[in-house]
Image (tube, grey):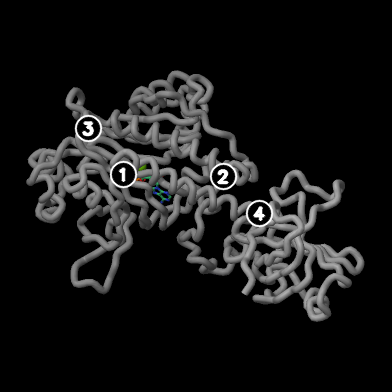
Amino acid sequence: MSVRTLSVEAVSKVGAEVTIKGWVNARRNMGKIVFLDIRDRAGTIQTVGVPSQMTPESVERLKEVRLEWVLELKGAVQERGAKQKNPNSPTGAVELLIKELKVLAKAEPLPLDLEDEKIGLGIHLDYLPITLRSEKYRALFKIQAEIVRGFRDYLNAQGFTEIQAPKIVAAAAEGGADVFEVKYLKNKATLAQSPQFYKQIMVGVFERVFAVGNCFRAEQHATTRHLNEFTGLDLEFGMIEDHHDVMNLETELLRHILNHLDKTVSSELKLWSYIRPELPEKIPYFKLREVQELIKKETGVDHTNEPDLEPGEEKWLGNYVQEKHHSDFVFITHYPTAKRPMYTYPDEADPEFTKSFDLLFRGVEITSGGQRFNDYNQLVQSMKNKGLNPEDFKFYLESFQYGMPPEGGLGLGLERLTARLLGVDNVKEATLFPRDLNRIDLQLSPPEYKQ
Ligand code: ATP
Ligand code: MG
C-alpha cells in the first residue's frame, strides 16, 4: 500500500506522486474536467480529474462520485496557475492531478447543504452526524477540544492531579429537584450533578486535583443556558487562604486557555464571531449586595434582598464591567449562606454571607466556586443548620475527620464557556450531542418542520 499524504503535507510535495485519502467536500464540473475538494483530518485540498490523465476505470468511477464519498486518490501534486491560487487556503497554491481513483466508501445524497448558514438549530441537531462535518462545526469542536487541553495543561503544570469521579452517587449526596434518579441499584442512587464530594475527598489525598467529566441536571426549565448533561471542568485545592486564591487561579487559568487558543486554533476562531475577551490583570469583583445596590442606583430596580441575580441583571452587570472596567469577566462574591450548599464557607466577619463566588463571562454565569468548610465539626454543624442528617454523609465526612487543610475550588461549564467565547446564543449549539427535555439525539416529539 502506498504511503498516505495528508492534504496540508502536499504543499511541500510539488512534482511528487502522492496518495490522498479523504471525504469529498465539494464537486465542481467544468466540462469534462472535474474538481474535487478532498477533506481529511488536517484540512482540504483541491484535486482535479482530467480524463486523458486518468486510468479508464478511474474516469468511470469519477462520474459517480458525490459529496461525502470517501476516496483514495493517487496522482501528482502540481502548482496551480497564478490566477488559480487561493491565498485563503493553506493548500491554495497546489492541487492534485488525479491518476487513479479508488472508492473507499459511498455516501447517499445529502439531505441538506452542510455549509448552509440558514439551517435552523432543530434541523442542525437532527442531522448532527453529518452537520458536525461542516467547516464551522468542525472548527467549533476543535476549539472546544483545545479549551479542555488548555485546562489540563495549565493545571498539570501547577501540580494538580487529574481524577475520574464517579457518575453514580448516593441519593442523599446532593439532593434537590434537579437530580436524575437511578433505579436498579439496591441503594437509592442518582446521576452526579458534579464531582463535588469526590474532588474534595481527593484534596485529602493529592492536595490539588481536577476533573473533566459529565454532570447531570434534571433542569426544570428549557433555557438557552441549560442542558441535562454538560461537561464540568472542575478543580479543588488545599492550603488556601480564602476564596481569592481560587479566583486568582481561575483568572490565570483563563488567561492560559485564551493564549493556548490563539496559538492552536486561530483560523478556526475566525470562522465564528470570536473577539478575544478582555481579561485584565485582576478581574473586577463585587459582593452580591454591592451589585444589587449598584443596580438599584443605576436602574431604579430594588432587588437588594434577593438571594441571587436574575439573568437580566447578570447581563446588565456584564455590560457595566465591560464599559467601566474593560473586562468581559466579573466575579460576584458573598452569596447568602442560606442559599449556598452546606459545604460553603461563611465569611467570619459577616456569617450571613459566604466566601463563595460566581464568575460571569459576557453576562452569563460560567463558574461557581469558593472556599469550603475543612473543619469536621463546622461542616457537621452546617449540615444540621440546613436540615441535613450528617449520618447520610458519613463517607464524605471521613476525609474531614482525618485532616483536611483549608481548601476551595470551582466548577466551570465547558459548553457555556465555548458558547460565550464564540458568540453562540444557545448553549446547545456549543454542545457536541446536547440532551434536553425534548431531545436525546433525535427530537422526542416530532416538531412541525417534519411533515
Ligand atoms: P445556573 O444557576 O445557571 O442554573 P448553577 O449555579 O446551578 O447554574 P453550578 O452548580 O454552579 O450551576 O455549576 C457550575 C457551572 O456548571 C455553572 O456555572 C455552569 O457553567 C455549568 N452548568 C451548571 N448547570 C448547567 C446546565 N444545566 N447546563 C450547562 N451548564 C451548566
Ligand atoms: Mg452556580
- Mark 2 is surrounded, within 10 Å at the Cα level, by few (under 14), some (14 to 19) or many (20 or more) other residues, namely some
Name which of mark 1 and mark 2 comes first in the sequence: 1
Residue tagged by mark 1?
235
| Closer to viewer: mark 1 or mark 4 | 4
Q: Can the viewer see residue 111?
A: no
Q: Position of residue 96 (x, y in %)?
A: 76, 61
Asked if disc 4 is less than 8 Å from ligand 1, the answer is: no
Left or right placement of residue 243 versus residue 404 in this view = right
Between the residue at mark 2 and the residue at mark 3, the CA separation in whole angstroms equals 34 Å
Give the label on residue 8, or none. 4
- Quadrant location of ligand 2? top left
Three-letter amino acid code at disc 3? Ile
Name which of mark 3 and mark 1 comes first in the sequence: 1
The secondary element bearing badge 2 is classed as loop
| Closer to viewer: mark 2 or mark 3 | 2
| Closer to viewer: mark 1 or mark 2 | 2
Three-letter amino acid code at disc 4? Val
Residue at 18% from the left image edge and 48% from the top image edge: 205
Residue tagged by mark 2?
265
Asked if disc 1 is less than 8 Å from ligand 1, the answer is: no
Three-letter amino acid code at disc 1? Leu
Three-letter amino acid code at disc 2? Val
Residue tagged by mark 3?
240
Name which of mark 2 and mark 3 comes first in the sequence: 3
Name which of mark 4 and mark 3 comes first in the sequence: 4
For the image, the number of numbered tags is: 4
Between the residue at mark 3 and the residue at mark 1, the CA separation in whole angstroms equals 13 Å
The secondary element bearing badge 3 is classed as loop
